[in-house]
Image (cartoon, rainbow, N blue to C red):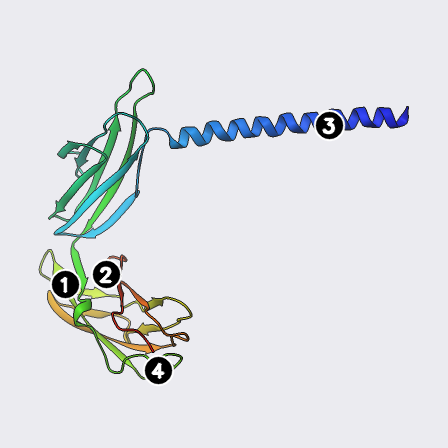
Amino acid sequence: MMNTVLFKKSSSLLSGLICIMMGLSITFSVYAKQDCEGISVAQRQYDIGFNSKLNVVAYNSTKELAQWSLYNSENKLMGQGVGNATGELEFTTPGTYKVVFTVAATSDHEAHSDASTIVVHSVKMTFLFDEMKFSAFPKKGIDTKGTTLKIPVQVESFDGKTVKYNAPSFISAGIATDIKGEIKAEFVELNPGKTVLTYQLSGSAKLGGYIMFDFADINGQIQSTTLNQEIK
């Protein structure tokens, strides 16, 4: 009798657990389905310099065609169109903008909308990777200490004034590389036009090969380049 009772209790407990797990599974499925339905922007916020172009994209899981609208910081309509991407929008004036994608309600689903914010900064900084030069090209497994990298940047300022760049270090990406570069100054003053930045390198590419450098611009956005020469 004792064994039978214990077996019945275990069976009841197991059944309860199965029901709970099924319930959780059903609940999870419902929420996952809700998250996937409708329209969702590919990126919540963009940070760009003025005089930049941007294609804002959304994912649309409905059968309906989305409509998009562009608003400025005063909520004034600046443009609109149809589709899941805006195409290249040009932002010539600093400020905060918003692109809203909307899918109208149908008999199959409710109306859906989502939005991306575009922060347009008053300074635009472009690394001119085609013009960067090493004092000595890195070698496989050799520390780059004592090597410099010079790279010009093109700077545009909305008001035409000099700006301060906080000179963050750049990092490398690739297999077994820890090469990085630092500017020996807390800030660099950048005048509109071209300025050459000089980085002091350290670290090595232990296995050689092709590596990538990632630079942060004045707006905190990453600009990357892959070395077109193999490290041997």
**Label 1 secondary element:** strand
Q: Which residue is mark 4?
A: 145
Q: Which residue is mark 1?
A: 155
CA–CA distance in space, label 3 to label 4? 66 Å
Upstream in the sequence, badge 2 or badge 1? 1
In the foreground, 18 or 102: 18
Which label number is shown at residue 13?
3
Q: Which residue is mark 2?
A: 218
User: Which residue shows up at 59% across the image and 27% down it?
Assistant: 22
Q: In the rendered structure, which amino acid carries the disc numbered 1?
A: Val
CA–CA distance in space, label 1 to label 4? 29 Å
Upstream in the sequence, badge 3 or badge 4? 3
Q: In the rendered structure, which amino acid carries the disc numbered 2?
A: Ile
Picture quadrant of residue 12: top right
**Image marks 3 and 1: residues in contact by CB distance under 8 Å:** no
Q: Is residue 206 above or below residue 157?
A: below
Q: Is residue 209 above or below residue 113?
A: below
Upstream in the sequence, badge 1 or badge 4? 4
The answer to whether residue 117 is left or right of residue 79 is right
Q: In the rendered structure, which amino acid carries the disc numbered 3?
A: Leu
**Label 2 secondary element:** loop
Picture quadrant of residue 174: bottom left
| For discs 2 and 3, the disc positioned in front in the rendered view | 3
Residue sitting farthest toward the top? 107
